[in-house]
Image: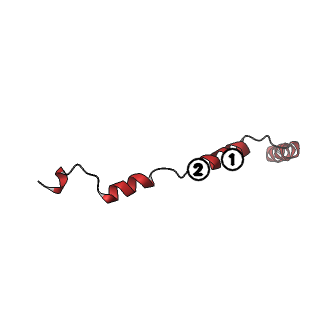
């Protein structure tokens, strides 16, 4: 039998599979990011963006 016939995972394969999992803290970080992205923009910021857009049209 050759090494290719062995059905057991090598230690390197086990480490690679373990590394592909996300750490537990990533779900909390994703929730925080999503909450910040979904926050409405303040009116003053929207006004500033509108002024910048108007400047491009002149």
Question: In the rendered image, which quarter is residue 53 located in?
Answer: top right
**32 left or right of 13 in image:** right
Question: Between marks 2 and 1, how big is the CA–CA gap?
Answer: 10 Å
Q: Position of residue 4 (x, y in %)?
A: 18, 53
Q: Determine the secondary structure under disc 2.
A: helix
Quadrant where the C terminus is found in the figure: top right
Q: Position of residue 38 (x, y in %)?
A: 73, 40
Viewer-closest of 12 and 54: 12
Q: Position of residue 47 (x, y in %)?
A: 87, 43
Residue drawn 60% across the image and 52% down it: 25
Q: Earlier in the sequence, mark 2 or mark 1?
A: 2
Q: Which mark is residue 57?
A: none
Viewer-closest of 40 and 5: 5
Residue bearing the label numbered 2: 26
Viewer-closest of 50 and 40: 40
Residue bearing the label numbered 1: 32
**29 left or right of 38 in image:** left
Residue farthest to the bottom, as pictured: 12
Crowdedness near tag 1: few (<14), some (14–19) or many (≥20) residues, C-alpha within 10 Å:
few
How many numbered circles does the render carry? 2
Q: Determine the secondary structure under disc 1.
A: helix
Residue drawn 87% across the image and 42% down it: 43
């Amino acid at each position: 039998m050759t090494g290719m016939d062995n059905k057991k995972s090598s230690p390197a394969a086990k480490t690679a599979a373990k590394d592909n999992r996300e750490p537990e803290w990533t779900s909390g970080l994703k929730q925080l990011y999503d909450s910040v992205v979904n926050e409405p923009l303040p009116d003053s910021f929207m006004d500033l963006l509108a002024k910048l857009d108007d400047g491009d049209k002149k």
